[in-house]
Image (cartoon, rainbow, N blue to C red):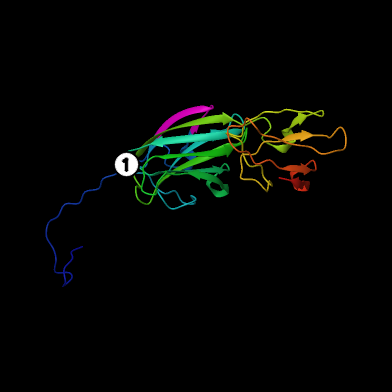
Amino acid sequence: TGFSQNIPDAYGPFTLSVVQRQSPANDDFANRIFLSGASVQSSGTLSNATAEPGEPNSSPSAWWSWTAPATGTLYLNASSDTLGAVFGFFTGDSISNLQFVGSINPTWYDGTGAYGQLQVLQGETYQIMLTGSYVHPNGSVSFDMELALAIPNDHLTNAYSLTGLVAIGSSSNTIATLESGETNSNGRTVWWTWTAPVSGPVSISTIGSSFAPWVSVYTGTQIADLNLITN
């Protein structure tokens, strides 16, 4: 139709153009790209991407899927000159039943790319949703994911056993995690268990450690029934 202050006075010849641009191949959840392995490299774009009905947010997105081959810490590093990459991790096998696990974002609110880590479980499939930040919502990105295996005594059920009047143990909490239900810690915990062979005072030392560890002593056999003795 014509437009003027005195509709319908505006008229004359005009040209109408319709342009359809190609969306990314993994624009929709059903067409997500499947990744595999403990070391993964991939790339993607949000150029001409759309927001699929029912997605966790209303921003243009692209999708990947990855199944953790082992339990551990997943490190994701993404590089981009234009996109503030936000990677959302979900469990679930359809748009309607996705459960949010965590996200990895740009290191600064107005930065591009992204860097971060996420705790993952062996055999769990994670649906990965790429969106853009408010400051840099569009562009392309390359990213790699590296899985670092969990520390063997990361969880109480896998605690290392110490025995005798004098017992020495070693481990690292560099990539350890906070087990569900744990309290009285700053995260990155590792566990030992020791049964006193006799009654009497006990001394505990962490001399020789590369940092100042926070050591707690409990009775009990499960996270839910632990009774703190001392820190």
Q: Locate residue 26, reporting x and y percent.
A: 43, 38
Seen from the viewer's position, the closer of residues 171 and 7 is 171
Kindly report the secondary structure that dominates the magenta region of the rendered protein: strand
Residue 196 included in the magenta stretch of the image:
no
Q: Locate residue 102, reporting x and y percent.
A: 53, 45
Residue 227 as seen in the image, left or right of residue 77? right
Seen from the viewer's position, the closer of residues 59 and 160 is 160
Seen from the viewer's position, the closer of residues 208 and 14 is 208
- Range of residues picked out in magenta: 34-43
Q: Residue furthest bottom?
A: 6
Quarter holding the N terminus?
Answer: bottom left
Residue 112 as seen in the image, left or right of residue 184? left
Q: Residue furthest right?
A: 198
Residue 212 as seen in the image, left or right of residue 111? right
Quarter holding the C terminus?
Answer: top right
As helix, strand or loop, the secondary structure at mark 1 comes to loop
Number of residues whose C-alpha sits closer than 10 Å to that of mark 1, classed few (under 14), some (14–19) or many (20 or more)? some
Q: Locate residue 61, reporting x and y percent.
A: 42, 45
Residue at mark 1: 82
Q: Give the residue at x 58% y 38%.
A: 119
Residue 38 included in the magenta stretch of the image:
yes
Image position of 226 with respect to 13: above or below:
above
Number of labels in the image equals 1
Q: Give the residue at x 67% y 30%.
A: 152
Q: For residue 11, which quarter of the picture?
A: bottom left
Q: Give the residue at x 21% y 48%.
A: 17
